[in-house]
Image (cartoon, rainbow, N blue to C red):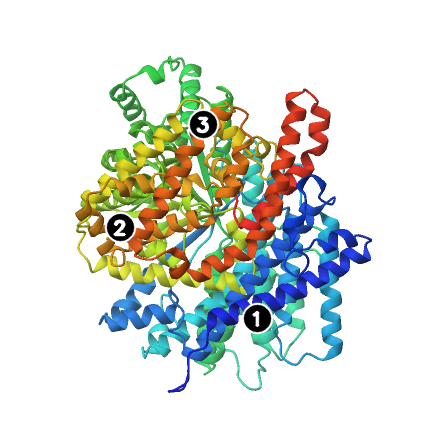
């Protein structure tokens, strides 16, 4: 932007673009519906027709839920595209520093703080971020529907080209209408639960087709911002260590409460991950061969590459001779085609790609990386450094990032399941294990530590000990066999959910010994995979430092960390213990303020404990898709982490619908991964140069958390709360939905404790209460003394954690709707019960709004107009769907209460479609 120019009104530009693109989509959808003989339905389309509030919920047209669901999905696409457009415009107008949280902004701020360039470059080399894609039941859309959404988003991008010829405009409109008709005919609703194969296919789409295209763009944006900041480009040149993105997944490995994840499923998942990694690399090598059409008359192969080519030719035999007979004057291309032939995958057009074993083929990714490195160095040797950088380096980066495994598969299981497996093994070996839970922790540890001094398993590998033992050992043996064949790169960690004591972790060592996941060294037994505690409830978070401290003191833990730190013999890494913290269960048990403060304290203490023990703690954040489950803007989340808790290495879950929202298209995926990489880099530098000093307001936050927790517990512990909850929200309908392959309850018991946090949050959101996202905050703030409240207000802008939590609570309050809350509450049959709980909830709602405004000094309407405008755009159309859902819920429950299950089952698809439509409108489930 030149001096004197006014700053564009980006908010107005964004909303104008939303209106234009949304009108185009809705007009096209209206035309499609009219052509299909559904003119009445088309007349009810929101935003550009008659006011939808006039629709009587008992007389709505058939399939109104479906058309509204599609309309909201189109709005979501349009908003996403407009956000990307405005970001690009701002960068053009104001430069690379314009967008908060991205590389340009981060480098400018670090430079302003006088952080040396050398320190920033060194930190870049040790940053590693790992999004872990999971398949919790939060993605309410069918996978076939997501395919159509991707096609529509691509068409939306084509509309942005200026001066499109009339013929191309007509073609674009025709293709859009065709995509919309496919979407309409596909239908939104899942008539059957998705299988694990379905969920795996969805995750593989992102790992195979999205992320490989994004990563070169991420590197280019890093280089551009680095040079724009005035830093030395040579520091990021050939051979420089750049930030690493790795990927993980739980699909096919997470068996906590999911009996469908068998050893066979895990084996198949590891195989599909390997196949798809090789497909990614083969694609990139094929493109590289096309680029390297260098003639031998212009530059001959250096002797080093001639020798490498001859070695590959000898290994491949006859196949190599056929390759060398073609393109005889292009030896560089031939070299790459030999690498393609060595890639152990068979790619077919009309059937899934398969692994293949052939003489001379690559077994490990390091072998391919070595050949690519030789090619890069040879290009530099003949003076083609630019080609080495632009053509070979991205492929080499892909090999380093995806390897031959694509993503690491974690194995997660509940500690109670592990204990059952151990008890069965003990009993099968002639040891009474039936009373394990009755033993004291001292007795349990004495037994486990004695067992871990011996490499001898309890049973022969072919023996059966019981269902839980067989399930665990079957899975572990699959993992051991995969590691023996392919190495350990494709396997993540053994995660123990509901870790509540040290013995929960040592049990896993014993089970690993039984299945071949340990090695005997001169010093003693080691586990070849990380054993990772998952601390979920508030009590577990408070106990976490004590549990981790004693775990790190265990001789087998120390030996195992040392063994794993050698990274398969490639390099010596710092001793690192991964620790997973869950955001959902602590919130469900204690409310949002107590949960967030408990997580903050636990991470600070765990990080300090690691430093004292000489072990780096790598946090794995189990975040969900809503505020109550840890969601929030990435850059704010990273800034809010406790000081000295980030060591440059972080894992985060990406669950359900958030995967599509963050990574559904190239531009958005690039933006979100850049936010993560740049944010982790800046936060790591900040953490490493600051002393771990407790925040001055810690005592005030302790009081705030305690008071808010008490208010929250009073609500959920009040007699008949479960009755109110089950009647005032659509939780019963959600339990009949087909939105994920796993059950909504861990064990099937009809209790609040057994209900998973995801449907708990989903149901409150559907009824517009959003209780998990704000309840208790008002009472907590009200309980503070005047000077304590003044301290909160004073540090709101300077303490990122405080700002992050209170802003997220405010966002949850903004998403509530008092009128709709009362309407859903009217479904509660007992009026006295309804009135009692609504008074508690509504009083807390008013108090929370009042206290937040008191802290902020102004109402939300003045401070966050863009957020409120976005909510308002959806409000009117959502209201129609909510009234329809209330009507359907009442009718469906009536059929069930009267015993007419056939009638209830017949109308269930309409009810589930209503749920899907509202989830689309709210952009959230759980």
Res. 613 in view = no
Which label is found at residue 752? 3
Q: Is residue 474 left or right of residue 48?
A: left
Name the secondary structure under disc 2: loop
Q: Position of residue 264 (x, y in %)?
A: 57, 35
Q: State yes or no: discs 1 and 3 in contact (Cβ < 8 Å).
A: no
Query: Along the line of sight, which residue is nearer the eye, 539 or 307?
Result: 539
The residue under label 2 is 642
Q: Position of residue 582 (x, y in %)?
A: 38, 40
Question: Viewer-nearest of labels 1 and 3?
Answer: 3
Write the residue at 30% across / 29% down: 501
The residue under label 1 is 288
Is 766 above or below relative to 370?
A: above
Mark 1 Cα shell of 10 Å, populated few (<14), some (14-19), many (≥20): some
Q: Earlier in the sequence, mark 1 or mark 2?
A: 1
Is 757 above or below relative to 111?
A: above
Q: Earlier in the sequence, mark 1 or mark 3?
A: 1
Q: Earlier in the sequence, mark 3 or mark 2?
A: 2
Mark 2 Cα shell of 10 Å, populated few (<14), some (14-19), many (≥20): many
Name the secondary structure under disc 3: loop
**Gap between marks 3 and 2 measured at Cα:** 31 Å
Q: State yes or no: discs 3 and 2 in contact (Cβ < 8 Å).
A: no
């Amino acid at each position: 932007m030149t001096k004197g120019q006014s700053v564009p009104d980006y908010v107005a530009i964004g909303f104008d673009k939303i209106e234009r693109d949304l009108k185009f989509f809705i007009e096209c959808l209206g035309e499609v519906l009219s052509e299909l003989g559904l003119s009445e339905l088309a007349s009810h389309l929101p935003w550009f027709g008659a006011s939808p509030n006039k629709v009587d919920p008992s007389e709505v047209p058939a399939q109104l839920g479906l058309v509204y669901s599609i309309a909201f999905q189109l709005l979501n696409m349009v908003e996403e595209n407009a956000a990307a457009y405005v970001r690009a415009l701002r960068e053009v107008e104001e430069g690379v520093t314009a967008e908060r949280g991205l590389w340009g902004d981060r480098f400018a701020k670090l430079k302003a703080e006088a952080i040396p360039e050398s320190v920033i470059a060194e930190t870049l080399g040790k940053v590693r971020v790992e999004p872990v894609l999971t398949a919790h039941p939060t993605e309410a859309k069918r996978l076939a529907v997501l395919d159509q959404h991707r096609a529509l988003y691509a068409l939306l991008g084509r509309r942005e080209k200026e001066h499109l010829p009339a013929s191309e405009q007509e073609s674009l409109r025709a293709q859009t209408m065709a995509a919309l008709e496919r979407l309409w005919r596909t239908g939104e609703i899942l008539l059957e639960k998705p299988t694990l194969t379905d969920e795996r296919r969805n995750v593989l789409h992102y790992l195979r087709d999205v992320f490989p295209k994004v990563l070169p763009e991420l590197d280019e944006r890093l280089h551009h911002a680095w040079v724009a900041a005035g830093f030395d480009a040579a520091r990021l040149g050939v051979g420089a260590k750049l930030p690493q993105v790795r990927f993980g997944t739980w699909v096919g490995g997470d068996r906590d409460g999911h009996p469908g994840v068998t050893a066979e499923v895990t084996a198949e998942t590891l195989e599909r991950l390997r196949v798809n990694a090789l497909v990614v690399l083969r694609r990139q090598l094929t493109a590289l061969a096309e680029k390297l059409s260098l003639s031998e008359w212009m530059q001959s192969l250096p002797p080093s590459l001639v020798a490498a080519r001859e070695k590959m030719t000898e290994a491949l035999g006859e196949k190599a001779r056929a390759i060398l007979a073609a393109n005889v004057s292009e030896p560089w291309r031939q070299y790459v085609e030999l690498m393609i032939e060595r890639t152990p995958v068979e790619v077919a057009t009309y059937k899934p790609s398969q692994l293949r074993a052939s003489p001379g083929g690559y077994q490990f990714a390091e072998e391919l990386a070595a050949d690519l490195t030789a090619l890069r160095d040879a290009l530099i040797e003949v003076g083609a450094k630019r080609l080495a950088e632009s053509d070979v380096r991205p492929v080499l980066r892909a090999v380093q990032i995806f390897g031959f495994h694509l993503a690491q598969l974690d194995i997660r299981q509940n500690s109670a399941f592990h204990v059952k497996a151990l008890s069965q093994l003990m009993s099968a070996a002639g040891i009474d294990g039936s009373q394990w839970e009755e033993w004291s922790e001292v007795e349990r540890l004495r037994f486990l530590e004695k067992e871990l001094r011996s490499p001898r398993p309890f049973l022969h590998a072919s023996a059966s000990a019981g269902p839980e033992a067989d399930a665990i050992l079957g899975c572990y043996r699959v993992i051991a066999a995969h590691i023996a064949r392919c190495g350990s790169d494709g396997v993540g960690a053994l995660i123990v959910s509901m870790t509540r004591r040290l013995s929960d972790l040592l049990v896993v060592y014993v089970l690993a010994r039984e299945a071949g996941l340990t090695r005997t060294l001169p010093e003693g037994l080691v586990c070849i995979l990380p054993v990772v505690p998952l601390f979920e409830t508030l009590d577990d978070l408070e106990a976490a430092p004590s549990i981790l401290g004693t775990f790190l003191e265990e001789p087998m833990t120390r030996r195992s960390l040392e063994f794993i730190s050698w990274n398969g013999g490639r390099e010596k890494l710092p001793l690192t213990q991964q620790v997973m913290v869950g955001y959902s269960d602590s919130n469900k048990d204690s409310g949002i303020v107590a949960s967030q403060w408990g997580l903050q304290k636990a991470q600070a203490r765990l990080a300090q404990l690691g430093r004292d023990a000489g072990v780096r703690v790598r946090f794995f954040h189990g975040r969900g898709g809503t505020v109550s489950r840890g969601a929030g803007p990435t850059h704010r989340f990273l800034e809010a982490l406790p000081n000295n808790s980030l060591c440059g290495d972080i894992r985060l879950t990406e669950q359900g619908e958030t995967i599509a929202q963050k990574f559904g298209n190239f531009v958005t995926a690039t933006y979100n991964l850049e936010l993560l990489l740049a944010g982790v880099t800046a936060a790591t530098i900040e953490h490493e140069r600051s002393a771990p000093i407790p925040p001055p307001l810690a005592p005030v936050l302790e009081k705030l958390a305690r008071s808010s927790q008490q208010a929250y517990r009073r609500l959920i512990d009040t007699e008949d709360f479960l009755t109110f909850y089950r009647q005032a929200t659509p939780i019963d309908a959600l339990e009949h939905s087909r939105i994920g392959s796993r059950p909504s309850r861990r064990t099937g018991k009809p209790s609040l404790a057994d209900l998973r946090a995801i449907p708990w949050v989903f149901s409150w959101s559907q009824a517009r209460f959003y209780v998990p996202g704000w309840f208790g905050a008002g009472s907590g703030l009200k309980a503070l003394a005047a000077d304590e409240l003044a301290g909160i207000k004073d540090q709101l802008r300077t303490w990122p954690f405080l700002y992050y939590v209170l802003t997220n609570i405010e966002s949850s309050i903004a998403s509530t709707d008092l009128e709709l809350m009362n309407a859903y509450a009217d479904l509660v049959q007992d009026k006295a019960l309804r009135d009692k709980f609504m008074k508690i909830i509504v009083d807390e709602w008013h108090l929370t709004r009042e206290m937040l405004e008191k802290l902020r000094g102004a109402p939300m309407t003045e401070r966050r107009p863009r957020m409120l405008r976005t909510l308002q755009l959806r409000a009117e159309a959502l209201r129609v769907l909510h009234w329809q859902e209330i009507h359907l819920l009442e009718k469906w429950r009536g059929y069930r209460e009267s015993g007419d299950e056939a009638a209830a089952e017949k109308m269930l698809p309409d009810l589930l479609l209503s749920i899907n439509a509202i989830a689309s409108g709210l952009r959230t489930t759980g």
